[in-house]
Amino acid sequence: MTYLPIVVLTLLLSAARAASTGEQVLAWPAGVTYRAAGPDHTASGPGAALPVGPGAWLFDAGAHALVAVPADDEPVASLPVPGFVHALLVRAEGDLAWVDLARGVIVLARPDGAVTREVRLPAGVTRVRRLVEVDGRLWLHTAWQESLAVPETSQAPLRAWFQSRREGLLFAADRPAVQVLATAGRLELLLGRPPQGPTAGKDALTRLTLTLPEPALAGEVLGPAPQGGWWLRLTLGTRAAARDVLAVVDADGALAWQAPLPARGTLSWPDTLFVTGDGGVIGLTPTDAGIVRREWRRP
C-alpha cells in the first residue's frame, strides 16, 4: 500500500468519471485486512465504505486509515486518520468529514486527511446514520429519522444542536425533510417544510401514502430522485417471504420503478446504498471476493 502525494490523491477523490451501469468487483487491496467467515467466527474487515468516482473508499480500522480503492490500474492510496470512521462524506469542495462514534466526535479534514476541527456530539446522540451537505452546511442524520445541523464551533452547547433540529431527513434545500412511516403493511412519507412568514413554528407537514403492489414491512429513505421523487429501500411481502427492493416513488407517492436488491454482504456497514449527485444510486456490497459495486438509474 502506498502513500501518494496530496495532488495525486486529491485527483483520485474528486475525479468525476462516468461509471457504467451494471456490476463490477473491486478486489480487496493488498494490506487491507479481510477475513472470510468460518465455523467459529463472522467475517471481519473494513468498517465503512463510500463510492468515489468509479472506485470506493474503505475505512481500515486496524490501520486507522482511509483507503482509496480504484477501479482500474491506478495505485491504491491510503490516508492515516485518527480514531474510527463510522460515516464518511466527501464535501463539495473536496474536504472530508466523518463521524467517529468511538470518540463521540465529527471530524472535519482537508483532502490530504489533515484534521482541521473536531465537533463533539451531544450526549445521547449515538444512533448516527450519515452526514450530508446542504448548501455548504453539514447535517447529521440519525436512525430516528431526524436531521441536526452541525454547529460551527467545536464545543457547541446542546441548544445549538437542537435549535436546528428537523423532523425527517434533510437532503437538499429545495426538498422537504422526509421520513417514512410503516403501519400494518402500508407506508407513508411524512414531508415537512419550514413555516413561511415571520411566525416561528413547527414544519408544515404533508402525508403521502405510497401506492405499492403488495404489503410493505419496512422502508428507508435513501435520498431524492429526479423529477421530485424519492429513492427508497423497501422490504416487501410477508415476514415468511420478505425481500428487499430498491425503488423510486414519484412526487405523488406512486411506485415508478423497482429492482431487486442483493443481500447486504459479509460485513456490517452503516451504509451500502448511496444516492449520487446526478440522480442515480450506487451500491457497495462486501463479499469474500471483494466489493461488488453496482449502479442503478431510473429508466
Image (cartoon, rainbow, N blue to C red):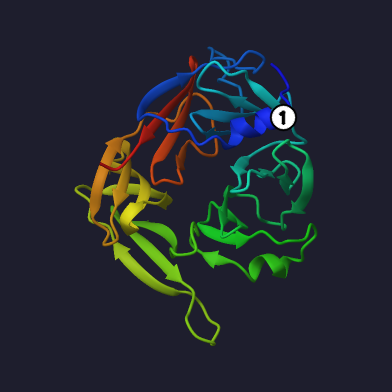
**The image quarter in which residue 65 lies:** top right
Residue 30, image x, y percentages: 63, 13
**The image quarter in which residue 3 lies:** top right
Residue found at x 67% / y 37%: 85
Residue 140, image x, y percentages: 60, 54
Q: Where's the N terminus, which quadrant?
A: top right
| Above or below: residue 72 compared with residue 187 | above
Q: Residue furthest front?
A: 7
Side of 208 where 98 appears, left or right: right
| Above or below: residue 136 compared with residue 193 | above
Q: Residue furthest left?
A: 213
Q: Which residue is mark 1?
A: 79
| Above or below: residue 55 compared with residue 182 | above
Q: Secondary structure at mark 1?
A: strand
Q: Residues within 10 Å of mark 1 (few under 14, many from 20)?
A: many
Side of 113 where 42 appears, left or right: left
Residue 89, image x, y percentages: 60, 43
Residue found at x 31% / y 45%: 247
In this orientation, which residue lies closer to the viewer: 213 or 246? Answer: 246
Q: Where's the C terminus, which quadrant?
A: top left
Residue 84 visible, this angle = yes
Residue found at x 45% / y 19%: 25
| Above or below: residue 278 compared with residue 190 | above
**Amino acid at dot 1:** Leu
Residue 59, image x, y percentages: 64, 30
